[in-house]
Amino acid sequence: MTAGQRPDLRDVARDDERRKRDEAKVVALQQQLDELRTLLREHTARQGRNEEQFRSYELALAAQRQALEQLRHEASQAAQARQLEDARMRQQLLASTRLPGRFGRCRRT
């Protein structure tokens, strides 16, 4: 062996070490990519479930709003019917107090 061959062996050893480090980095990066892909899949699935749940909540809320609107409508109709009935009763009471002889004279004491 000559002196000129030794630096070549050192260069080869350095290149080999560099290649091994690069391969280790590539393997580590591939593992990180795989982990990121897995996390992304999990996140996407979770987001899909959350969106589905949100849609079901929106549907339930719409049903509750409709039920509330129906209840308001029924309450309004009941109030109107009560007002009409009160007005009829007042008219009947007034008519009965105006009829002479029907109930006799009402005395107030």
Image (cartoon, rainbow, N blue to C red):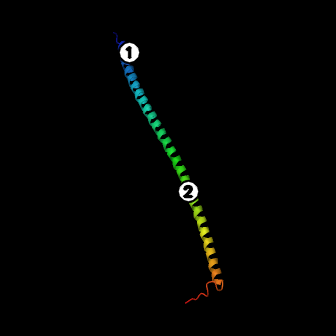
Q: Amino acid at mark 2?
A: Ala
Residue 67, which numbered label? 2
Q: Residue at x 48, y 39 (%)?
A: 45
Instruction: Give the left or right position of residue 63, taking residue 33 as reference.
Output: right
Q: Secondary structure at mark 2?
A: helix
Instruction: Give the left or right position of residue 98, taking residue 15 as reference.
Output: right
Instruction: Give the left or right position of residue 77, taking residue 10 as reference.
Output: right
Q: Give the CA separation, mark 2 to mark 1.
A: 87 Å
Residue that carries the numbered disc 1 in the rendered image? 8
First in residue order: circle 2 vs circle 1: 1
- Closest to the observer, 57 or 33: 57
Q: Residue at x 49, y 42 (%)?
A: 49
Task: Identify the residue at the far top of this view.
Answer: 1
Looking at the picture, does residue 1 appear above or below residue 64? above
Instruction: Give the quarter of the figure containing the N terminus.
Output: top left
Q: Residue at x 35, y 14 (%)?
A: 6
- Location of residue 81 in the rendering, given as x and y in whole percent from the top left corner: 61, 68
Q: Secondary structure at mark 1?
A: helix
- Location of residue 85 in the rendering, given as x and y in whole percent from the top left corner: 61, 71
